Image: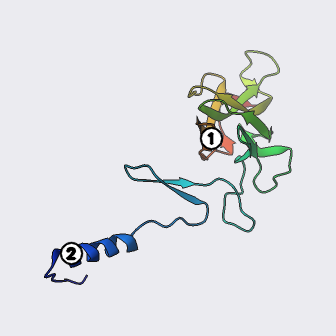
Amino acid sequence: MSISVFKKWTSAVLYLNEKIKRNSLIAGRNIKLENTGNGIKIHGSAESTPGGDSYNGYFKLVKTDDDKIKIIDGFNDTAANAAKVNVNYFPVTVAASEFTITADSFIYLECQLKYEVEGSPNATGASATIIQSATELESEAGTFRALISRVTFEAGAIDFSRENVPLNILMSGACS
């Protein structure tokens, strides 16, 4: 750090102005800067770029239209499935899903155990689907929910997060 002595206040202002310019934010790949007037808001883009370093795993969210998002397998974006998970050690394939967004919402992976006889302590299988909810949900007896994304819909624009979804899910109930 250099220490400068200024004889005129104008040269001090010019010096500080130049320092501020050199320390301003510069948007990089998949980053968008928005000056809100009260500060700079930094947005990460979820759109993939060829050869880029964007997310390419299970449960990838992509914007398919101004008001639609789709949950896909990021490694194979044309696959009919978004992921494979294990629910109480039962392998379950989760279908890719597309949702129309008209308001803020939450996207979940919802898993349930299947029983041959209702009330039986031994599960014989499991199911997993992707659902959309207007409110934040919690797991409940017999149903496990993992948050995939929080979606905001503001001024006709969609913004969304990518949450870490577990691929091995254990629910109460034994496997047969």
The reply to whether residue 176 is in sight is no
Callout 1: few (<14), some (14-19), or many (20+) C-alpha neighbours within 10 Å?
Answer: few
Q: Which mark is residue 36?
A: none
* Residue type, label 2: Thr
Residue 61 in the image: state x and y as whole percent: 70, 46
* Residue type, label 1: Ala
**Residue in view at x 19 percent, y 83 percent:** 4
Residue position for label 2: 10
- Label 2 SS: helix
Residue 36 in the image: state x and y as whole percent: 43, 49
Residue 150 in the image: state x and y as whole percent: 58, 38
Q: Looking at this rendering, what residue extends furthest in the top direction?
A: 118
Nearest-to-viewer mark from 1 and 2:
2
**Residue in view at x 82 percent, y 21 percent:** 116
Residue 83 in the image: state x and y as whole percent: 77, 46
Residue position for label 1: 157
Residue 132 as seen in the image, left or right of residue 27: right
Q: CA distance from mark 1 to mark 2?
A: 44 Å
- Label 1 SS: strand
Answer above or below: position of 162 versus 67: below
Which quadrant of the structure image shows residue 30? bottom right
Residue 167 as seen in the image, left or right of residue 37: right
